[in-house]
Image (cartoon, helix red, strand yellow):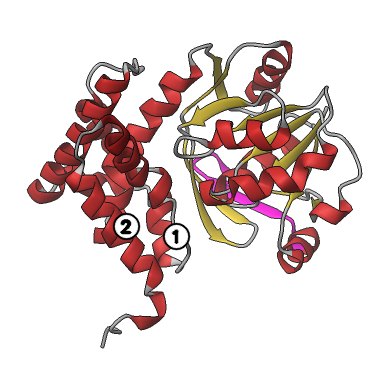
Amino acid sequence: MKFLIVGPGAMGLLFSARLKKMAEQEVFILDYKKERAEYLNKNGIRVEGIKGKFYVQVPVLTKEEVDFCPDFIMIFVKSYSTKQAAQDIKKIVSANTSVITLQNGIGNIEILEEELNKKVYGGVTAEGATLLATGHVRHAGYGKTIIGPSSEGMIKLAEVLSKAGFDTEMKDNIQSFIWGKLLINVGINAITALTRLKNGMLIEIDETKSLMKECLKEAIEVVNKKGISLPYKDPIKETEKVCERTAENVSSMLQDVLSNRLTEIDSINGAIVREAEKLGIKAPINQTLTYLVRTIQKTYQKRVSEK
């Protein structure tokens, strides 16, 4: 089967490399940066992690170079680039193409469906990946990947992902899992981005642990008001467990801040603020975290330097 992976970030590279190397699929990567695509085509992808290292060559194309209709398109771009990604792939999406997003945040499925005028599938992954350099990713930890709802295409995809070494499950109530991951990200990402701490430290320090609980309480109120059923009973305890399991992980938002990149704050804590406003309730902790991270990403070149 033919795969197009949209976005050569940490997750995009990890899934591309393992689909090609382990599952022996025909895999291509779509990149909007011509120079980066040329570099990746020349140097390939290096993956390192708890199960060793490997190298694989995966063709990287710009949108002008894609002249085929893939069986599967997997979206891994940052949430603020979802609409542009949809526009870039629109001409190559056929009736037989299955499109799935494993992005952070909420609203990505809806944006893709509106732009592509077809059903789009969703998913979440607990795989840990850190981008060390262009084309070089550290597989920091294994976790479950959940996709859905069930369809002929998703059944095939689950089989291939399992062959590639991803612990994959199919669920029809996929929005429950997307919101479940959102709350985990709400409790972890912004706080790590602001404090520059690894995940595990958030539950070692009283102040960050309390802050995590407070922003999650606001998110829980939103979820309860919307009548969303989460895939776990206690979001606070679940987030603390994730911090324990991924103690050495550098969150994706902290990776963005350390690299002076735009973050996904508006699709995570900012999303809680927007949903709270629609429901007529307040989310001041999430609003403050959103403001602070936005300020950081707007002032990368204006910081007081360390001496």
Seen in the image, is 272 located left or right of residue 132?
A: left
Q: Main secondary structure of the magenta part?
A: strand
Please, is residue 245 above or below residue 225 in the view?
below
- Is 44 a magenta residue? yes
- Most foreground residue, 226 or 186: 226
For image coordinates 24% across by 46% down, the residue present is 286
Does residue 114 appear in the picture of this structure?
Answer: yes
Dot 1 amino acid type? Asp
Inter-mark Cα distance, 2 to 1: 8 Å
- Most foreground residue, 280 or 41: 280
Under circle 2, the secondary element is helix
- Most foreground residue, 15 or 109: 109
Question: Pointer 1: what residue?
Answer: 256
Dot 2 amino acid type? Ala
Please, is residue 9 above or below residue 303 in the view?
above
**Outermost residue to the bottom:** 307
Under circle 1, the secondary element is helix
For image coordinates 34% across by 41% down, the residue present is 274
Q: Give, as a single range, the part of the protein colored magenta.
A: 43-53
- Is 62 a magenta residue? no
Q: Residues within 10 Å of mark 2 (few under 14, many from 20)?
A: many
Seen in the image, is 14 located left or right of residue 282?
A: right
Does residue 54 appear in the picture of this structure?
Answer: no
**Outermost residue to the right:** 67
Question: Pointer 2: what residue?
Answer: 193
| Image quadrant where one finds the C terminus | bottom left
- Most foreground residue, 293 or 238: 293
Percent position (x, y) of residue 153?
73, 17
For image coordinates 34% across by 15% down, the residue present is 229
For image coordinates 86% across by 55% down, the residue present is 64
Percent position (x, y) of residue 175?
46, 21
Q: Quadrant of residue 133?
A: bottom right
